Amino acid sequence: MPLSPDSAEKRPLLETLPQQLPGRVAQAAVRGDALQQAPGRPVLMLRPARVKVGSIIGLAIAYTVTHVLVEWDDGGGHDTRWVASWLVRRL
């Protein structure tokens, strides 16, 4: 665990991390769970691509032969879902 740069104060720096860290950890956990439930063998994209599924605009982060893993922020939270590839349009 890294310590603060001030030698007089040897408290961990983790106390000063932004409050968004738990949300990012939860987002990574949701993404990991979705990858485990892939319909086939998932291929991760090096650069997520902006896509549109119906009226939703999100990011395609992985794909299989038949499906695309799309994640988006729906205002109230973060959602990640496998969608049939024929429903996904790249922007």
Image: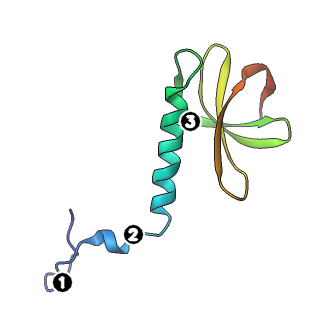
Residue 45 visible? The answer is no
Mark closer to the observer (3, 1): 1
Label 1 residue SS: loop
Task: In the displayed orientation, state which residue is furthest to the left.
Answer: 7
Q: Which residue is mark 2?
A: 17
Q: Position of residue 88 (x, y in %)?
A: 77, 28
Q: Residue at x 80, y 42 (%)?
A: 56
Q: Nearer the viewer, residue 58 or 74?
A: 74
Q: Nearer the viewer, residue 18 or 37?
A: 37
Q: Is residue 84 above or below residue 7?
A: above
Q: Are marks 2 and 3 in contact (CB under 8 Å)?
A: no
> What's under tag 2, amino acid-wise?
Leu
Q: Which residue is mark 3?
A: 47
Task: In the displayed orientation, state which residue is furthest to the right.
Answer: 55
Q: Nearer the viewer, residue 66 or 50?
A: 66
Q: Quadrant of residue 16?
A: bottom left
Q: Quadrant of residue 14?
A: bottom left
Q: Position of residue 85 (x, y in %)?
A: 73, 21
Number of residues whose C-alpha sits closer than 10 Å to that of mark 3, classed few (under 14), some (14–19) or many (20 or more): few
> Which of pointers 1 and 2 lies earlier in the amino acid sequence?
1
Q: Residue at x 73, y 22 (%)?
A: 84
Residue 29 visible? The answer is yes
Position of 43 with respect to 69 (left or right) is: left
> Which of pointers 2 and 3 lies earlier in the amino acid sequence?
2
> What's under tag 3, amino acid-wise?
Arg
Q: Quadrant of the N terminus?
A: bottom left
Q: Quadrant of residue 15?
A: bottom left
Number of residues whose C-alpha sits closer than 10 Å to that of mark 1, classed few (under 14), some (14–19) or many (20 or more): few
Label 3 residue SS: strand
* Circle on res. 9: 1
Q: CA distance from mark 2 to mark 3?
A: 26 Å
Q: Residue at x 70, y 59 (%)?
A: 76
